[in-house]
Image: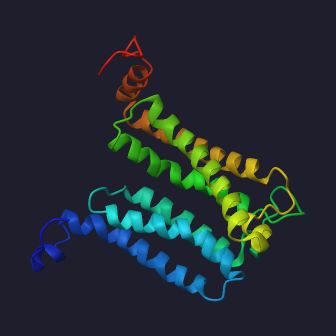
């Protein structure tokens, strides 16, 4: 972060540093308050701890890297919404969340399906920002890679869930996995995340095309052009 700010800079509404970090700070504080509230007497403490291990690591990573890489306000908002949904599921355990929407089946609680869908819906856009701004990914690949990354992370999470339950919490396996008797639960969860990511990337592509049509078309065409005929050619 930059050197210490003078009082005038700190309270100057035009100061970019202050303005740039105020909104995500508000979101973080709001999430922290709700997280603490939901940490009190969860339905299953072991499941709650397991569900929050990766979340705590991810939030710490966001905080530690915020001075070097700041997401857009929209991405921070999406991350906030996903974390809120997950915090509720961790408190009650997903099968026991009292907000059963009965979207597809009356025999199971579909809240976990909503959260997996939200994983793709809300986190594909931040992933695209990373690809665009760090890897300089453009055109078709700037929309495809976030979708692919969502599927990869979703599948990896399902494997981590299985490994965690098998090694550390076999007695809490049913609550932690939230399969609710569905043998294809893991596959459906990954599919829901992919569907959410596909929807977000489709909307992002349409918005990008409408805002800068000529540049969008040029980047899209260039991204599909062969740059190196020989794949074994040295850099």
On screen, residue 56 versus residue 71, left or right, reads right
Query: On the image, which quarter does residue 65 sit in?
Result: bottom left
Q: Is residue 179 visible?
A: yes
Total marks placed: 0
| Rendered image quadrant of residue 68 | bottom left
Query: From this viewpoint, which residue is outermost toward the bottom?
Result: 41
Q: Is residue 133 left or right of residue 128?
A: left
Looking at the image, residue 94 lies above or below residue 190: below
Q: Nearer the viewer, residue 21 or 55?
A: 55
* Location of residue 109 in the rendering, given as x and y in whole percent from the top left corner: 80, 66
Colour mode of the rendering: rainbow
At 71% from the left edge and 58% from the top edge, which residue is drawn?
A: 162
Residue at image position (36%, 25%) is: 214
Residue 11, given in percent of the width and then of the height, sits at 18, 77
Where's residue 224, x and y in %?
Answer: 45, 20
In percent of the image, x 16 and y 73: which residue is there? 12
* Res. 100 visible in picture: no
Q: Position of residue 137 (x, y in %)?
A: 38, 35
Task: Report the residue that reaches farthest toward the front.
Answer: 167
- On the rendered image, what quadrant is the N terminus found in? bottom left
Q: Quadrant of the C terminus?
A: top left
Q: Which residue is painted at 56% across and 86% down in the image?
A: 37
Which residue is situated farthest in the right direction here?
A: 107
User: Is 6 left, or right, of 30 in this rendering?
Assistant: left
200 shown above or below 3: above
Q: Is residue 5 left or right of residue 35?
A: left
- Residue 113 picture quarter: bottom right
């Amino acid at each position: 972060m930059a050197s210490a700010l003078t009082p005038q800079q700190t309270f100057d509404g035009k100061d970019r540093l202050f303005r740039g970090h105020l909104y995500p700070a508000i979101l973080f504080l709001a999430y922290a308050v709700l997280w603490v509230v939901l940490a009190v007497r969860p339905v299953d403490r072991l499941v709650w701890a397991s569900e929050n291990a990766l979340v705590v690591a991810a939030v710490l990573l966001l905080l530690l890297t915020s001075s070097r890489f700041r997401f857009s306000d929209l991405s921070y908002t999406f991350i906030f919404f996903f974390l809120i949904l997950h915090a509720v599921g961790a408190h009650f355990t997903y099968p026991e969340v009292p907000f059963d929407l009965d979207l597809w089946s009356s025999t199971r609680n579909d809240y976990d399906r909503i959260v997996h869908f939200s994983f793709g819906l809300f986190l594909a856009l931040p992933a695209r920002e990373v690809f665009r701004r760090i890897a300089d990914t453009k055109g078709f690949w700037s929309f495809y890679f976030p979708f692919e990354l969502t599927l990869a992370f979703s599948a990896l999470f399902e494997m981590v869930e299985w490994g965690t339950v098998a090694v550390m919490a076999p007695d809490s396996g049913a609550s932690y996995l939230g399969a609710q008797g569905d043998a294809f639960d893991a596959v459906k969860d990954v599919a829901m995340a992919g569907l959410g990511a596909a929807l977000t990337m489709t909307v992002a592509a349409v918005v990008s095309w409408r805002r800068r049509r000529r540049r969008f078309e040029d980047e899209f065409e260039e991204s599909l052009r062969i740059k190196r005929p020989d794949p074994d050619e040295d850099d």
